[in-house]
Image (cartoon, rainbow, N blue to C red):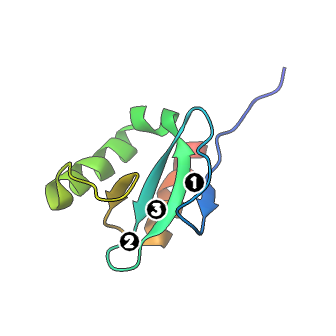
Amino acid sequence: MAIRMPRIIKKSSTGGDVPKGHFVVYIGEKQKKRFVIPISFLSQPLFQDLLSQAEEEFGFDHPMDGVTIPCSEDFFVDLTSRLRK
């Protein structure tokens, strides 16, 4: 029996398909980078805390095609690495 680990898919452009079971987030404050991450992250308390902080700063009006999270790319990659373990 194989264990499938979720992974982060980094996209440099705003185009492209989002695989089933994933969603788009934009990371950064000034220059935003687009990531496609597993929906399963939504049930993780660490990720929910990050989303709550994003809601406080940006609200729910996201002008791009995904959620904007105002944190550094390094912080986001570190957090999602911990979620994958």
Quarter of the rendering containing residue 43 = top left
Hey, what amino acid is under mark 3? Phe
| Image quarter of the N terminus | top right
**Badges 2 and 1: C-beta atoms under 8 Å apart?**
no
Look at the picture and state if 44 lies above or below 70.
above
What numbered label is drawn on residue 81? 1
Q: Position of residue 84 (x, y in %)?
A: 59, 44
Neighbourhood count class around disc 1 (C-alpha, 10 Å): few under 14, some 14–19, many 20 upward: few
Kindly give the residue lying farthest to the right in the view shown.
1
| Image quarter of the C terminus | top right
**Badges 2 and 3: C-beta atoms under 8 Å apart?**
no
Q: Earlier in the sequence, mark 3 or mark 1?
A: 3
**Viewer-nearest residue: 81 or 66:** 66
Neighbourhood count class around disc 2 (C-alpha, 10 Å): few under 14, some 14–19, many 20 upward: some
Hey, what amino acid is under mark 1? Ser
Quarter of the rendering containing residue 71 = bottom left
Q: Earlier in the sequence, mark 2 or mark 3?
A: 2
Tag 3 residue: 76
For the point 32% across and 74% down, which residue is it? 29
Q: Nearer the viewer, mark 2 or mark 1?
A: 2
Look at the picture and state if 1 lies above or below 65.
above
Q: Position of residue 8 (x, y in %)?
A: 61, 52
Q: How many marks?
A: 3
Q: Position of residue 2 (x, y in %)?
A: 82, 26
Marks 3/1: CA–CA distance: 8 Å
Tag 2 residue: 28
